[in-house]
Image (cartoon, helix red, strand yellow):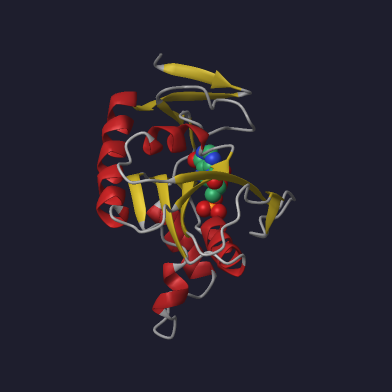
């Protein structure tokens, strides 16, 4: 399908399934290189609901022993985007002493993963890294500007919290649906990725 309608909006085909799949092959190879030979199986932490499809695809390509857990967070729902993140479902496994790989559908401003990193370390995770399917670097940069993290005084450590260590694809600052990603909870089921058609 070249175009789809989700709620009131029209989206057009942007990234074909075969291209998504081959980008997942590549990011999985990077994870394999990083975690292969790990003494204790790391936990792949799927961030519900958006990352379900990506997590399933990614997991099947991993050649090291891995545990699976889920967690759900949501951005504060209000008229102003305060960037406040709320935990809706706590991690379904005990993270204590484990290396954790956060599996996200998309890193947009980076505020969700920054929140998650701090949160999971407090829960006792040994080490936390992020693997996302889609990454919007322009949006992340804009967020760093807003947070005053682009000045010479900004510590590299603070800036790094917003960045995914691994990502399958980077995209411009556009709104997308499909492959797990939604527009107001619909549009997750498509195999391809669609972009808002304006
Ligand atoms: P961040 O905290 O701004 O990085 O936002 C991350 C979350 O916003 C993702 O987990 C998605 O749920 C949502 N999101 C950001 N961009 C898109 C998009 O283009 N389509 C669908 N959801 C998105
Ligand atoms: Mg999400």
Residue 16 drawn at (x, y percent): 33, 25
**Left or right: where does residue 90 sit relative to residue 51?**
right
- For the N terminus, the image quarter is top left
**Left or right: where does residue 147 sit relative to residue 7?**
left
- Determine the residue located farthest toward the right in the rendered image: 78
**Left or right: where does residue 187 sit relative to residue 16?**
right
Splitting the image into 4 quarters, where does residue 35 fall? bottom left
Q: How many numbered marks have been drawn onto this rendered protein structure? A: 0
Residue 65 drawn at (x, y percent): 37, 45
User: Is residue 193 visible in this depiction of the protein?
Assistant: yes
Residue 96 drawn at (x, y percent): 56, 63
Q: Residue at position x 48%, y 69% from top?
A: 145
Tell which of 91 and 142 is nearer to you.
91
Tell which of 183 and 62 is nearer to you.
62
**For residue 67, above or below residue 86:** above
Tell which of 53 and 67 is nearer to you.
67
**For residue 162, above or below residue 48:** below
User: Is residue 105 visible in this depiction of the protein?
Assistant: no
Q: Residue at position x 27%, y 37% from top?
A: 25
**For residue 158, above or below residue 45:** below
Tell which of 146 and 113 is nearer to you.
113
- Determine the residue located farthest toward the bottom in the rendered image: 153
Q: Residue at position x 26%, y 33% from top?
A: 22
**Left or right: where does residue 115 sit relative to residue 57?**
right
- Determine the residue located farthest toward the front in the rendered image: 39
Residue 156 drawn at (x, y percent): 39, 77
């Amino acid at each position: 399908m070249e175009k789809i309608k989700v709620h009131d909006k029209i989206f057009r085909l942007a990234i074909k399934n075969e291209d998504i799949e081959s980008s997942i092959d590549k990011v999985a190879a990077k994870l394999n290189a990083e975690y292969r030979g790990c003494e204790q199986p790391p936990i792949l932490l799927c961030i519900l609901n958006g990352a379900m499809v990506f997590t399933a695809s990614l997991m099947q390509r991993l050649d090291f022993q891995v545990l699976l857990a889920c967690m759900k967070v949501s951005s504060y729902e209000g008229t102003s985007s305060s960037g406040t993140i709320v935990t809706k479902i706590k991690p379904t496994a005990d993270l204590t002493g484990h290396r954790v790989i956060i599996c996200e559908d998309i890193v947009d401003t980076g505020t969700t993963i920054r929140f998650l990193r701090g949160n999971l370390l407090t829960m006792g995770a040994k080490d936390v890294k992020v693997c996302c399917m889609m990454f919007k670097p322009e949006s992340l940069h804009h967020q760093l500007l807003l947070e005053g993290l682009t000045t010479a005084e900004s510590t590299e450590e603070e800036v790094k919290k917003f960045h995914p260590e691994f990502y399958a694809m980077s995209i411009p600052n556009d709104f997308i649906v499909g492959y797990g990603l939604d527009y107001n909870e619909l549009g997750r089921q498509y195999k391809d990725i669609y972009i808002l058609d304006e």
